[in-house]
Image: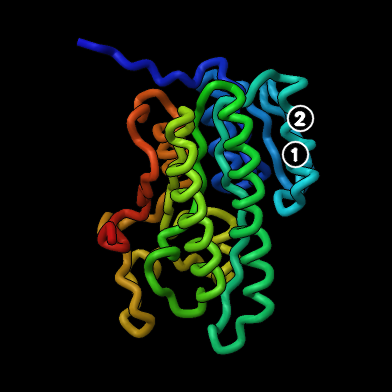
Amino acid sequence: MLMIMDGIDGRVTVVTGAAGGMGAAIAQLFADRGAVVAAWDAEPLRSTPPGGLAQQVDVTDKAAVRGAFDDAERALGPVRIVVHAAGVLRTGSALDAADDWSACMNVNATGTVTVASEGAKRLIAAGGGALTTVSSNAAASPRTNMAAYGASKAAATAFVRSLGLEVANQGVRCNIVSPGSTDTPMLRGMWDSSDQSDSVIAGDAATYRLGIPLRRLALAEDVAHAALYLSSDAARHVTLHDLRVDGGATLDM
């Protein structure tokens, strides 16, 4: 029987949004599996991955992103994996979405275009690789008070899938992980001082939210393992895929 190793060990991997939440979990898991991790965030990182690099990078700044890739490759070698997890969440009515729109589109959409397009060039130069973007199930399912966020994630998802179509014949796989409600500081920042886990899991008919059939919130590690799979040689024939990690909350629509 043909055995496919995960191919993560020793590969130079850029992880954005690595200071906390899903990005931090992804950076940690990849480092634990032997990847050489360049951890990026807009905020200073508290620690450097073993054998890797910590970089403060504004993902919306094209020159900064190009420079950060240059620095990572000079220090660590050719980049073979990119996991783009940087993002922001703003909530508010679609009737008054101008401020939310600017913040979400700048980071979630433009940031994805900037990192993914430059990252794909680096992967092509390295002879192939994997680019995975953390989007959201809100990209495909309407959510009350999340219009700007959902639109920005929909733009990111569409861009990465189209990018993947262009670069597939050059050995670059582009995939998306779309989490639902995940127990991170970003989610808890939407709540008041009380723990609202039970109400999120149960759903809310008044806001047309189904709830979570698996009856649990995701953990950041759940998203990290999905990103690891899509970045690994176990997924060598998977590209343009949008993998839902939401416990069935969107009925896999």
Residue tagged by mark 2?
70
Could you tell me which residue is drawn at 44 percent across and 49 percent down? 161
| Quarter containing the N terminus | top left
Question: In the rendered view, how is the structure colored?
Answer: rainbow
Rounded to the nearest whole Å, what is the CA distance between mark 2 and mark 1? 6 Å
Percent position of residue 95, x then y: 56, 89
Could you tell me which residue is drawn at 54 percent across and 37 percent down? 26
Q: How many marks?
A: 2
Left or right, 93 with reference to 225: right
Question: Of 32 and 216, which appears nearest the observer?
Answer: 32
Could you tell me which residue is drawn at 30 percent across and 71 percent down? 210
Identify whether 84 is placed above or below 87.
above
Residue tagged by mark 1?
66
Question: Dot 1: within a 10 Å radius of its alpha carbon, few (fewer than 14), some, or many (20 or more) residues?
Answer: some
What kind of element bears circle 2?
Answer: helix
Question: Of 102 and 43, which appears nearest the observer?
Answer: 102
Amino acid at dot 1: Arg
Percent position of residue 29, x then y: 52, 30
Question: Dot 2: within a 10 Å radius of its alpha carbon, few (fewer than 14), some, or many (20 or more) residues?
Answer: some
Identify whether 123 is placed above or below 174.
above
Q: Which mark is residue 208?
A: none
Looking at this view, name the residue that lies furthest to the top.
Answer: 1
Percent position of residue 41, x then y: 71, 44
| Quarter containing the C terminus | bottom left
Question: Of 111 and 138, which appears nearest the observer?
Answer: 111
Looking at this view, name the residue that lies furthest to the left.
Answer: 1
Left or right, 19 with reference to 144: right
Could you tell me which residue is drawn at 72 percent across and 33 percent down? 69
What kind of element bears circle 1?
Answer: helix
Q: Quadrant of residue 11?
A: top right
Amino acid at dot 2: Asp
Image marks 2 and 1: residues in contact by CB distance under 8 Å: yes
